[in-house]
Image (cartoon, rainbow, N blue to C red):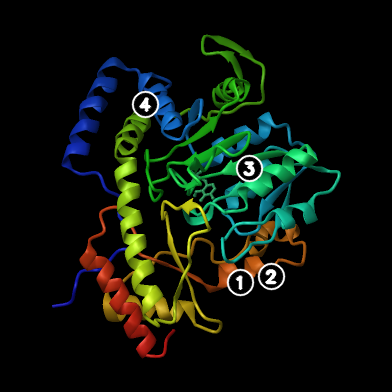
């Protein structure tokens, strides 16, 4: 009998969670308070408090939260530095807000960028920088990046879509700059089904974000539109789902960290071919993804297919298989010299990791990698 598959990820709502959610769904369906209600407000307040931020504004996706932040920063016609190693939405949100994304290279040891790379890319047209905490790693360069941008008079924002509760020296991802954006997409560390949130200490940013998310209306009861907003509202059913996962977030992150430590220990010892990536100094990652680096020349697709076929271990897609400028619709952004991003994207592989993963499942992944090494696949 073949073993059940170790899935790349699992989205966990246990019976207690489902009952909790169902009870509140019943309530909002009965009252008809289905959007912009008390559950959205509770999610905003609790998420912000857990991340040590003063304000939270929930919206209907992480893409929406990015675009709102960028519209508030008034990027139209201006350059915003974004990493080449990120999701499409980090750059597309800049474009949707009227700005020009300028790509930065990647340090393959942190999957992020560096202060030196930012400094190299700044021009008189640059107004700010979007840092992305890939896989839930927060680069040790954040303090240097904050200092550099202060000196240059540029803003810092964070696309923390991967980085719920990830920290650097105890400071939460999403709180290093003007505002941080998180995604609650189903595969993220916590989900609301679809959704996102902006966190910030700037009251004005929070107020503006509330205007933008509701069609730029002057207020909920007024039909006068004073900003170029959109329907970026989060519904109450989504907020209820998000609140339940938020309640479990610290525990779910601890569980991911336990699996991350287990992989680190096993892969650090064994010569399995795949190298674990040590967290940047001072960083407590949330292990949204567990990334290993493959030696040059390994056929990643073949290795993944073999792990699944022979050992029932299904790795997820890469965090990013190729950098942004390799997407046909963004090829015009290619500055022509992004060697670090090519290495980071080309050589990474993501091992299965999720909060409800058992030791037995993690052991199977470790054994499968060792077997792949023996078989000469890595
Ligand atoms: C780095 C990054 N930015 C932005 C987003 C967009 O978030 P959403 O899918 O909630 O719109 C994602 C999620 O997929 C992401 O991974």
* Quadrant where the image shows the C terminus: bottom left
First-in-chain label (2 vs 3): 3
Picture coordinates of residue 194, whole percent (x, y)? 42, 40
- Which of label 2 and label 3 is nearer to you? 2
Q: Which mark is residue 93?
A: 3
Residue 11 is situated, as x and y percent measured from the top left of the image, at 30, 50
Q: Are marks 2 and 1 in contact (CB under 8 Å)?
A: yes
How many residues crowd mark 3 within 10 Å: few (<14), some (14–19), many (20+)? Answer: many
- How far is disc 3 from disc 4 in space, using C-alphas? 25 Å
Residue 339 tag number: 2
The quarter holding residue 363 reads bottom left
Residue sitting at x 25%, y 44% = 13
Crowding near the residue tagged with mark 4, few <14, some 14–19, many ≥20 C-alpha atoms within 10 Å: many
SS for dot 1: helix
Q: Residues within 10 Å of mark 2 (few under 14, many from 20)?
A: few
Please rate how many residues cluster around mark 1, counting C-alpha atoms within 10 Å: few if below 14, some from 14 to 19, many from 20: some
Mark 4 — residue?
Answer: 236
Choose the circle earlier in sequence order: 1 or 4. 4
| Percent position of residue 357, x then y | 26, 59
Residue at (61, 59) in percent of width and height: 85
Asked if residue 99 can be seen in this view, the reply is no
């Amino acid at each position: 009998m073949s073993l059940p598959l170790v899935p790349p990820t699992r989205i966990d709502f246990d019976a207690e969670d489902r009952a909790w959610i169902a009870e509140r769904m019943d309530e909002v369906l009965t009252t008809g308070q289905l959007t912009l209600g008390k559950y959205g407000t509770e999610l905003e307040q609790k998420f912000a408090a857990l991340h040590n931020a003063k304000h939270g504004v929930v919206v209907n996706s992480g893409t929406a939260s990015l675009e709102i932040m960028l519209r508030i920063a008034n990027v139209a016609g201006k350059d915003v530095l974004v990493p080449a190693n990120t999701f499409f939405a980090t750059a597309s949100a800049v474009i949707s807000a009227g700005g020009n994304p300028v790509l930065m290279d990647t340090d393959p040891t942190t999957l992020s960028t560096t202060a030196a790379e930012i400094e190299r890319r700044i021009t008189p047209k640059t107004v700010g920088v979007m840092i992305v905490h890939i896989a839930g790693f927060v680069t040790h360069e954040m303090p240097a990046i904050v200092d550099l941008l202060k000196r240059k008079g540029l803003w810092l924002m964070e696309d923390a879509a991967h980085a719920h509760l990830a920290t650097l020296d105890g400071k939460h991802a999403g709180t290093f700059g003007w505002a941080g954006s998180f995604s609650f997409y189903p595969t993220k560390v916590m989900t609301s089904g679809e959704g996102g949130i902006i966190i910030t200490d700037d009251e004005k940013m929070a107020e503006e974000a509330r205007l933008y998310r509701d069609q730029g209306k002057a207020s909920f009861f007024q039909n006068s539109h004073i900003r170029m907003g959109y329907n970026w509202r989060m519904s109450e059913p989504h907020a209820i789902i998000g609140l339940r996962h938020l309640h479990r977030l610290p525990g779910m992150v601890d569980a991911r960290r336990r699996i991350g430590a287990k992989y680190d220990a096993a892969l650090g010892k064994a010569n399995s071919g795949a190298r674990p990536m040590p967290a940047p100094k001072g960083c407590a990652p949330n292990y949204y993804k567990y990334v290993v680096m493959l030696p040059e020349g390994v056929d990643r697709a073949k290795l993944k297919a073999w792990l699944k076929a022979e050992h029932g271990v299904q790795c997820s897609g890469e965090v990013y298989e190729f950098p942004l400028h390799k997407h046909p619709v963004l090829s015009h952004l290619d500055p022509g010299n992004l060697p670090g991003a090519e290495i980071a994207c080309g050589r990474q592989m993501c091992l299965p990791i999720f909060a409800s993963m058992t030791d037995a499942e993690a052991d199977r992944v470790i054994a499968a990698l060792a077997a792949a090494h023996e078989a000469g696949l890595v």
